[in-house]
Image (cartoon, rainbow, N blue to C red):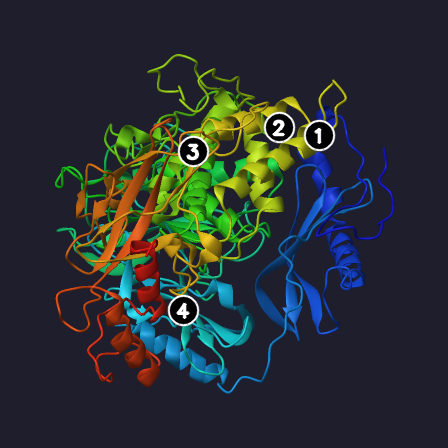
Amino acid sequence: MHGTLPHPLTGLVLTLALGVLPASARTLPPAARPAQQAQQANRVELAREYLMQQRTALGLGSREAFVPAKAFTNAEGEAVVRFDQTYEGCRVLGSQAIATVPMTGGMRIAADKVRAQVAVADAPTLTPEQATAIALHHLAPKGALADAPKVERVVFPAEFLGNLATTVDPDTGRQVLDRKLTVHAKLAAPYVWAYEVKTHLKNDQDGPKALTYFIDARTGNLLRVNNELYQEATPAVGTGNGYYNGAVSIPTSLMNDGTYALYDPSRGILPNPSLAGFADDGSGWGPTGLQVWYDQHDASGASTWMTYLFQSNPTNTWGDGQVFTAWGQENGANGQSAGVDAMYGITQTWDMFNHVFGRNGMDGQGTSVFAQVLSTNPYYVDNAYWSDWEQGLYLGAGTYPANPNGMNSLNELDVVAHEMTHGVTASTVKFITGAGYEEAGLNEATSDFFGQMAKAYAARATGADDAIPESGEAWRVGFKTGHGTPIRWLDKPSKDHRSVDGWYDGLYYMDGHYSAGVLNRALYFLAHGASATPGADDYSPYLPQGMTGIGNDKAAHIWFKAVTEILYSGNMGTVTYADAREAARQAALSLYGASADGWGLDSIASHAVENAFAAVNVGLAYGEMSRTQVRFADWRGQDWISRHHFSDTGYGHKQYFPMGEAVSPRVTVLNNANPAVTWSLGGPSLYNGATYVEKGGVINPDGTWTTPKNVGWFAITATSKADPNQFAEGRAFIINMDTDTDLEQDAIDLGPIAFSWQLTNGLNPAHSMYNAPWVDDADVAAFVDAMKSTWWNK
């Protein structure tokens, strides 16, 4: 069935009639894909022209346009194009349209992220050079920059104001908040001109950093800081005649001197951006192709801070299969084992994305990838990370067994595939990293899931290159890297005593590596099903009847389509687990069609998606009417819950209270006749990456909370008495309101507070007549909120 010509826009999400192909014909065989890829450029232009014609219907004006950002041809032969919205030629942050142009004609347009009525007043007063200088001042590098900063003028929506910048804790490798990088809480208009300044560090003093700064182009204020390193906290080991996978076949190259190197020029059509500046040494090497490098050390294990390609092997037999111990001999057989594991991992992952999903490389453009192994840099010796700037992954040497709590080398296949998958999401959906956003968990879980799919793919039967087998995965991340203790379990994430098995309101406070448990478990259920036996690892109290899975291959195709063709964040943190569920449902319907009962928007696969997400408390199961929900929701039109302290979702649903008072935090219980909750101090995030938050005070027998007698952020959890599986974690900021020092906190205190605010337009003790209490950069409204929320009936 052929599609029709484009028809008028009827909403923000367009579907231009698309023929539904039989399920057996949806995925093209690899040999048929080049003909479709050859038409990609024409389809990109067709989609751009159509979007430009629809500007009025989308609420856009003549100053706005669409420019292609990324395009690829998927496994079904459709061109998928992401278009950035521009205003006066400058990119509008977080605004993108996604066009899917099928081989049968017609197209689908997802334009729900397009922003109508964008208007920016005045012109920038800062130059790009001045904005760069501001960013570098905040970056404060201790060593040399790895690359010159990249600066671009953009339109910045006020809702994307950040909180505090993140930095990396050298002891744990975790992202933590850096209070030196406080951003400003208010903008003069909904949209302002800004400069996006991308910075890249990789030196002995700073370690690896890739921070993107957003600078107000008129005031020079720091609006937001994004961490662009896609870092995995607990990586693993690799393959080849390697320590992890034993004897395997790996691609190599015969060099001009007659020796061999761990270098595969057959994969990758564009040069690696980090290697493109290396001089041609006449050996036959080039920056195009997959390749493995190593950190060099002396015999005592001290790094020389030099890196080299694994090469000069006269026999083309690599590795001794043993754990690495031979410092100073990284290019010898013992060191080659790590290189073999890494090479096997990157080629298997590359091939999986290419043959199964039709994606040419991590960025979809065929850009070559390198892996660097055996690093002892303290920032990632027990870690691994993907650098999208460099299109490369860094795999630490590990500190085990000298450090019993450390890791084996980080070359295990699922760890390698995890990091490379960050390259896919970085060039498509652009998930943000770090705590404070639900999509941080979606980011890490997507990499965890495709890491398992890469393991299954590597175990495929000979010739079965275009599908994910139904076995071969362990659903454990880094089992061997953790020397027998997985870094994470996908079937039962809470086994690590830090990850969660289900969604709850407040999940975004948690570090993404642990909030990933929600999607990890949902995708496990989608592929393999859930048990109806209480106590089983694959049992869910949110879906006690259990479910049947649809298999690895279908689950992988559904989630790949969701993240590459439907979801979009743009590093702004806007994607939620509810969005992920809906995107997966749409992908299931698109890929696997309507059910035989003829009811239209139903299919066995879409029902499975609904059930799998319901099993992790995201949405309802197929046919389910309602379920209890606990929410720290805004009350009375947001007048009780502060909306004045930044717009970052990481600090949403917060409440302000005076210190040392018996208060009643507010929470909503939905879909249950019994609204009663049990309060408890703290919350899951305190054990899973939350920073600058404590638990304290006393829960009283009447259910009130006597707040702590010290200022700061505190976590508190409400659990439904009717359904203890449902709970929510919120934040409260405790304020010392006794500004007149009469040992009472009452309405009289608001006078000096307001006077101080009026005098200085900010509660700054250094310049105020009164030494107003510290309130974490909030304004006088925080004190009003504290009054209302504490003595609401007075």
Q: Answer with mark 1 or mark 3, whichever residue precedes in sequence.
A: 3
- CA distance for labels 2 and 4: 42 Å
* Crowding at mark 4 (Cα within 10 Å: few <14, some 14-19, many 20+): many
Name the spot of residue 543 as percent of width and height, x first.
46, 21
Identify the image quadrant of residue 497. top left
- CA distance for labels 3 and 2: 18 Å
* Residue at the image position 63 percent from the left and 31 percent from the top: 588
Q: Relative to 515, say whether 793 is above or below.
A: below
| Amino acid bearing label 2 | Ser
Task: Classify mark 1: helix, strand or loop.
Answer: loop
**Dot in front, 1 or 3:** 1
**Residue denoted by label 4:** 199
Question: Is 530 positioned to the left or the right of 684 in the image?
Answer: right
| Amino acid bearing label 4 | Thr
Q: Answer with mark 1 or mark 4, whichever residue precedes in sequence.
A: 4
**Dot in front, 1 or 4:** 1
**Between 743 and 258, the one nearer to me in the picture:** 743
**Residue denoted by label 1:** 601
* Residue at the image position 73 percent from the left and 36 percent from the top: 32
* Residue 606: mark in rendering: 2
Q: Answer with mark 2 or mark 4, whichever residue precedes in sequence.
A: 4
**Residue denoted by label 3:** 520
Task: Classify mark 4: helix, strand or loop.
Answer: loop
